[in-house]
Image: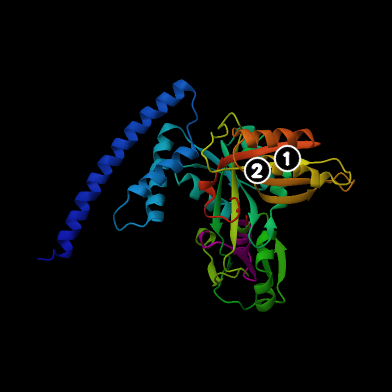
Amino acid sequence: MTPTLPELRIQIDKLDRELLALLNQRAHVAEQVGEVKRREGSPFFRPDRVAAVIEKIQQANTGPLKGEHVASIWREIMSACLALETPVRVAYLGPAGTFSEQAALQFFGASIEHVACSSIDEVFRATAGGSAGYGVVPVENSTEGVVSRSLDLFLNSPLHIVGETSLMVRHNLLRLSDSLEGIEAVYAHPQALAQCQGWLTAHLPNAERRTASSNAEGARLATTNPAWAGIASERAGVQFGLHTAAHAIQDDAFNRTRFAVVCLPQTLPAPAASGKDCISLIVSVPNRPGAVHDILGPLKTHGVSMTRFESRPARSGQWEYYFYIDLQGHPSQPHVGAALKELQQMCAFFKVLGDLPRRRLRRAPRCSNNSA
């Protein structure tokens, strides 16, 4: 006989209590883990450990729950348990409601201490200065390419990359009413304005496009004038009590943004080789004929695959460039270590930004692969 709805709800209530008891048992063990880490001086947050646990749980899943839902549930469980071990302070481009905040929550879980910053520069300063343990910064968008400011800041920053996450970015037009009528100005981060320029030209050709420090700040500005609108996430619309005048106005339906998770090396050292790794580095070469061609030689000689090559002007006034390169492999592998050593010897500037398992980058294109 099929159970009735009240009977099924009684079963669910019983299971919920059992789940809560087990979660609290896990939390007690996590507190003991925190004490051990504190005595040993071990890092509290280990993204490779989080990824490994989630992957193991997904492989053990035989029920109706989808793998991505299992991953989301366990990420939040581990985030809550980590908060019992030690608070995890994460800096990102604020205010609340930005895609950067969403990326931080996606990577760390909801049980973090939020450090909302007014600019990407401030995210780097807060993380390097110790007021946040980790920072989350946009580095690349599938429509508009690299986020120049983030790449420039890596040049002189002591921070290194310990993780990456990718978001499907859907931009919405937010304002005090749900109509497109009477909009005189649209506020957003420059990347978002660029990602929506086709839609704006077609639907709001007479509206002035004004830049804001973040999309969430653009949404906040839209609350101050009924003739203004902002481009931001649904989360920002809820945060500021705005109507969605138009949904998903980005020109590319598959618009994605890649974010880097950064910290000081003493907060979290580079992970050991996993067998599926990616190295990111910045180099520059002397301004002479054939110099760029020459830096590819060590990679070919030692059989190291390059999966990304971007150039940025050095701003020296001498037409010099920095090159941002992604390589497959880990520095501890003999052929990769030999290639890096040889490459460093011929470069005027050489800096490894990070090396990390590629499994964390599986949602993004390229070896890994922004909007604020």
> Quadrant of the rendered structure where residue 212 is?
bottom right
- In the rendered structure, the answer to whether residue 314 lies left or right of residue 258 reads right
Rendered location of residue 314, percent (x, y): 82, 45
Whether residue 352 is in magenta: the answer is no
Rendered location of residue 145, percent (x, y): 68, 58
Which residue is disc 1 drawn over? 298
Identify the residue at image location x=60%, y=41%. 329
**Amino acid type of the residue tagged 2 in the rendering:** Val
Q: Are marks 1 and 2 in contact (CB under 8 Å)?
A: yes
Q: Give the camera-side residue of 118 and 164.
A: 164
Q: What stretch is highlighted in magenta?
A: 216-235
> Quadrant of the rendered structure where residue 152 is?
top right
Q: Give the camera-side residue of 90 and 316.
A: 316
Q: Which of disc 2 and disc 1 is earlier in sequence?
A: 1
Is there any visible trace of residue 94 in the rendered image? no
Identify the residue at image location x=51%, y=59%. 235
Give the Cα distance between marks 1 and 2. Answer: 8 Å
Q: Which mark is residue 304?
A: 2
**Amino acid type of the residue tagged 1 in the rendering:** Pro
Question: Where, quadrant-wise, is the N terminus in this rendering?
Answer: bottom left
Q: Is mark 2 on a helix, strand or loop?
A: loop
Name the residue at the top extreme: 39
Identify the residue at image location x=49%, y=26%. 42
Whether residue 223 is in magenta: the answer is yes
Rendered location of residue 274, percent (x, y): 51, 38
- In the rendered structure, the answer to whether residue 208 lies left or right of residue 249 reads right
Within-10-Å neighbours for mark 2: few <14, some 14–19, many 20+: some
Q: What element carries label 1?
A: helix
